[in-house]
Structures are given as C-alpha cells and as structure tokens.
Amino acid sequence: MCGVTVMPGSEAGLTAVDNQWFDQDATDMVDTAAAGDQFGASLTVLPTAFAGYDGLAVGAPGEDANAVVDSGAVQLI
C-alpha cells in the first residue's frame, strides 16, 4: 500500500510526535486504494488560508478516473 507520512515541524526542525499517515483508504479521500495507483509518487506543499497550515498535494499517477485507465489524480490534504 502506498501512502505518505506528514511530520510536524517548527523552527527547531521535524518531530516524530503527532506524525500522520495518509493513504487512499483514509477518511475523506476521494477514492480507495487500488493496485498501480502509485499514491504518493509526487508531492508538493501549497500555501492555504486554513488555520495557518499549508496543504499537501499528493499525486497518484496510476489512478483510474472516469473510466480512463492510468489517467492520474491529485488529492489535497
């Protein structure tokens, strides 16, 4: 299963406290995991206006969407 771990950080660096794991089977994800989705193959951080936190765009280049095989998808966390 593919996924990403988000580690909180500060000016002092990263911390292992309160790590979060996200995969396609996590609550609020648009789809569920399937073989070949490659969820987490690409990542980028996006500035957001939500409570001062940045967002994370997670790529799944092998995701099948709208009956198009391997069309790919991006999930915002």
Image: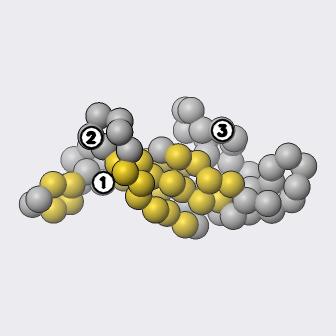
Which residue sits furthest right? 67
- Indicate the secondary structure of the residue bearing disc 1: loop
Q: What whole-number distance in Å separates the C-alpha atoms at marks 1 and 2?
A: 16 Å
Which residue sits furthest front? 49
Please tell me how crowded label 3 is: few (under 14), some (14-19), or many (20+) other residues with Cα within 10 Å: few
Please tell me how crowded label 1 is: few (under 14), some (14-19), or many (20+) other residues with Cα within 10 Å: some
Q: Badge 1 is on which residue?
A: 7
**Residue 42, placed above or below residue 27:** below
> What residue is drawn where x is 55% and y is 32%?
27
Q: Badge 3 is on which residue?
A: 30
Please report contact status of discs 1 and 3: CB closer than 8 Å, yes or no: no
Q: Residue 50, position in %: x, y?
A: 35, 36
Q: What whole-number distance in Å separates the C-alpha atoms at marks 1 and 3?
A: 22 Å
In the figure, residue 70 lies in which quadrant? Answer: bottom right
Asked whether residue 12 is in view, the answer is yes
Q: Amino acid at mark 1?
A: Met
Q: Residue 36, position in %: x, y?
A: 74, 62
Q: Amino acid at mark 3?
A: Val
Residues 70 and 52: in front is: 52
